[in-house]
Image (tube, helix red, strand yellow):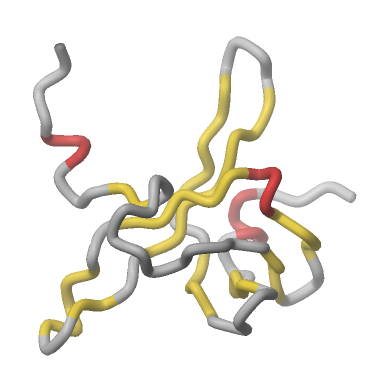
Amino acid sequence: MESSFLELRCKEVVNVLDGRKLGHIVDIVFDLQCARVLGIVVPGEKSGWNIFKGAGQLFIPFGCVVKIGEDTILVELRGQGVPTNPYILSVDDDKKPKN
């Protein structure tokens, strides 16, 4: 099955373990040297009273993708929402100086 990024970002991403809707794909991460998809990025959870600013972005490794359907992408994520979750990308990660 072939699919473009525009088609993928229209699909809802759902965690099969708890049924939580994670949002729509905002980015795809590639390894250009190996020519493979490493994972997808979805918006983070909204925090508290500030519904307009998310808590970062959530990186989902491609190995966690269970099924890509017509309308939905099913993923299996354990430990969702834990502050020490290694898959949560900080909002300011792209603004930090590179060493």
98 displayed left or right of 84: left
Residue placed most toward the observer, 31 or 7: 31
The image quarter containing residue 65 is: bottom right
Looking at the image, is 36 positioned above or below residue 17?
above
Residue placed most toward the observer, 28 or 60: 60
The x, y position of residue 55, in whole percent, is 23, 65
The image quarter containing residue 54 is: bottom left
Residue lying at 70% horizontally and 44% vertically, measured from the top left: 63
8 displayed left or right of 57: right
* Quadrant position of the C terminus in the picture: top left
Residue lying at 56% horizontally and 62% vertically, measured from the top left: 78
The x, y position of residue 77, in whole percent, is 59, 62
For this orientation, the residue located farthest to the right is 1
Residue lying at 21% horizontally and 36% vertically, measured from the top left: 94
Looking at the image, is 81 positioned above or below residue 39?
below
Q: How many marks?
A: 0
The image quarter containing residue 97 is: top left
The x, y position of residue 85, in whole percent, is 38, 53
34 displayed left or right of 95: right
Residue lying at 38% horizontally and 69% vertically, measured from the top left: 81
For this orientation, the residue located farthest to the bottom is 49
The x, y position of residue 13, in whole percent, is 59, 70
